[in-house]
Amino acid sequence: MNLATMQFHSRALGRHVTYTAILPDPVRHGPGPYPVLYQLHGASDDHTAWVHFSRLVHHVAPYPLLVVMPDGGLSWWCNAGPRERYEDFVVRDLADHVGAAFAARPGRAAIGGLSMGGGGAVRLGLKHPGRFASIWAHSSSLPSPERLRERFGLSAEEADADDVYAIAERVARLPRPSLPRLTFDCGTGDFLIEENRAFHRHLGAIGLPHTYREHPGAHTWEYWDLHVREALRQHAEMLGVTARP
């Protein structure tokens, strides 16, 4: 298992950006190409967080997955203005660079994350269903439309592009085979538990297939490190790869 730190110029952001990648061991998994998992960090972290604060490198070692962890700052993984277009950065610029730099398999990828990154994974995964086969988010920030407008001072029209409730309603009208598999979880002691429960109820009301799980735990790396292992199993299944013990 190897780690790479990459820097390139993003057209969407108008500057150089950095990401970390976990590379499959070619001796163990062959030369590739490998399916890609985009793993997003939370609001207080950066592109190194999943490597430094969890055992993700260890957990993903049995899988032939290329794990890409971009730096999103405090962007909430949204497009905001002409030079803060983090959604475009992830789904366009980053994907292009990963495809050129590594033995990345074309086609649909997986996406996951925690907290701010969990909300970003759900929103980006649902907003771009043709790009992602699997979504798994932990302890996600999933604000209601009203809370989203309050948080960022947006008008109803401006908030619509980033409103995960509205995005889910649009996606629910798509043919079922084209939908990504969506799972999200939250600790019962997490301060975001009610946001997750409310979003779960909304998905049920609009008939969008998903899995929601609650476990003992809080907004901690101990919780995320435990449950990211379940996420990896789903991603591998949906991307058509198996673990090699």
Image (tube, rainbow, N blue to C red):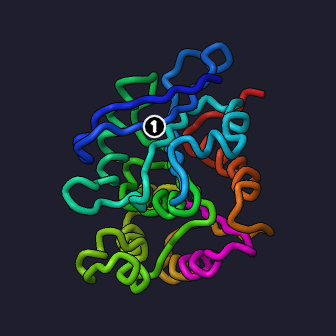
Residue at 54% of width from left, 58% of height from top?
Answer: 44
Q: Position of residue 128 (x, y in %)?
A: 36, 55
Residue at 61% of width from left, 64% of height from top?
Answer: 184
Q: Amino acid at mark 1?
A: Tyr
Secondary structure at badge 1 equals strand
Q: Position of residue 18 (x, y in %)?
A: 41, 37
Quarter holding the C terminus? top right
Image: magenta residue range: 182-200
Quarter holding the N terminus? top right
Residue 155 horizontal side relative to residue 146, left or right: left
Q: Residue furthest front?
A: 44
Residue at 32% of width from left, 34% of height from top?
Answer: 96
Q: Position of residue 106 (x, y in %)?
A: 40, 32
Q: Is residue 205 above or below residue 178?
A: below
Q: Quadrant of residue 50?
A: top right
- Nearest to the observer: residue 77 or residue 137: 77
Is residue 198 on the magenta stretch? yes
Residue at 65% of width from left, 13% of height from top?
Answer: 27
- Nearest to the observer: residue 20 or residue 230: 20
Residue 107 horizontal side relative to residue 230, left or right: left
- Nearest to the observer: residue 205 or residue 55: 55
Residue 60 horizontal side relative to residue 177, left or right: right
Which residue, given by chain and number where applicable, does mark 1 sit on? 19
Q: Quadrant of residue 215?
A: bottom right
